[in-house]
Amino acid sequence: MSTEAVAALLGMSKRNRVAVLDIADRIAETPSQISDYRTADADGRSMENLMVDGFLFTYWVDHASREVRITEVIRL
């Protein structure tokens, strides 16, 4: 987790922090789930966008390292 991500989490209320971490865990457990829509990043990589419990998660699945890379979380 990046320093920016830690700072963002620490800046949230405990309720939102727990919600974001729980949702991130669910995404990581089932990265092949169907997202709400797809976009592309500057490199042309397919980015999944999933709206859950008032948050929008943008992420991509790094199959080579078997990781889910969450690039953005926005409170809606």
Image: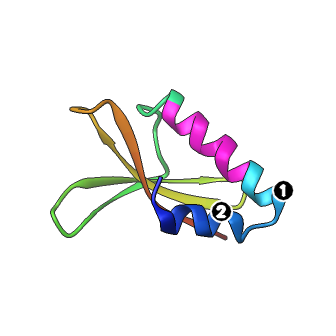
User: Could you say where residue 36 lies in the image, as x and y percent from the top left?
Assistant: 49, 51
Q: Do we see residue 44 in this rendering?
A: yes
Task: Work out how far the residue at label 2 is from the one at label 1, CA to CA, in angstroms.
Answer: 11 Å
Q: Is residue 9 left or right of residue 58?
A: right
- Residue 15: give its label: 1
Residue found at x 83% / y 58%:
14
* Nearer-the-camera pick, 48 or 29: 29
User: Magenta stretch: residue 22 in it?
Assistant: yes
Q: Do we see residue 74 in this rendering?
A: no
Which residue reaches farthest left?
Answer: 43
Crowd band around label 1 with a 10 angstrom C-alpha radius: few (<14), some (14–19), many (20+)? few
Q: Nearer the viewer, mark 2 or mark 1?
A: 2
Q: Earlier in the sequence, mark 2 or mark 1?
A: 2
Look at mark 2 in the image and give the residue it sits on: 9
- Residue 32: give its label: none
Q: Which residues are magenta?
A: 19-28
In the figure, residue 16 lies in which quadrant? bottom right
Amino acid type at image mark 2: Leu
Residue found at x 58% / y 61%:
6
* Nearer-the-camera pick, 36 or 58: 58
Check contact, mark 2 vs mark 1: CB within 8 A: no
Q: Is residue 19 above or below residue 75?
A: above
Which image quarter holds the C terminus? Answer: bottom right
Amino acid type at image mark 1: Arg
Crowd band around label 2 with a 10 angstrom C-alpha radius: few (<14), some (14–19), many (20+)? some
Residue found at x 52% / y 28%:
29
Residue found at x 46% / y 38%:
34
